[in-house]
Amino acid sequence: MNEQLLIRFLTGHCTSEEIELVAQWIATDEANGEWLFEMERTLNQLP
């Protein structure tokens, strides 16, 4: 998965097509979703 796409996803700057790509990536492996959740949690803790 493209790191830049994941950053755009986490910051709410994705197109609907990109959101679908991330959703498919998450669906391929539970660890992907867990990793993305942790990154989102970390991002939300930044000032």
Image: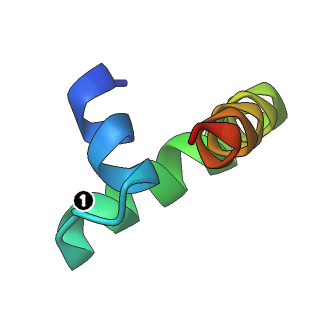
Label 1: which secondary element: helix
Quarter assignment of residue 13: bottom left
Amino acid carrying mark 1 in the image: Glu
Does any portion of residue 2 appear in the rendered image? no
Relative vertical location of residue 33 with respect to residue 23 in this rendering, above or below: above
Q: Is residue 44 left or right of residue 31?
A: left
State left or right for residue 37 relative to residue 36: right
Q: Residue 36, how many percent across, how many down?
A: 64, 37
Which of 27 and 39 lies nearest the eye of the viewer? Answer: 39
- Tell me the colour scheme of the image: rainbow
Crowd class of label 1 (few under 14; some 14 to 19; many from 20; radius 10 Å): some
- Identify the residue under disc 1: 18
Q: Is residue 9 left or right of residue 5?
A: right
Q: Quadrant of the N terminus?
A: top left
Q: Which residue is drawn at 56% across and 42% down?
A: 47
Please tell me in which quadrant of the rendered image residue 32 appears.
top right
Q: Residue at x 52, y 58 (%)?
A: 23
Residue pushed farthest front?
47
Q: Is residue 15 left or right of residue 11?
A: left
Q: Which residue lies furthest to the bottom in this view?
A: 16
> Does residue 7 appear in the picture of this structure?
yes
Residue depicted at x 51% and y 41%: 25
Return the residue nearer the eye: 2 or 43: 43
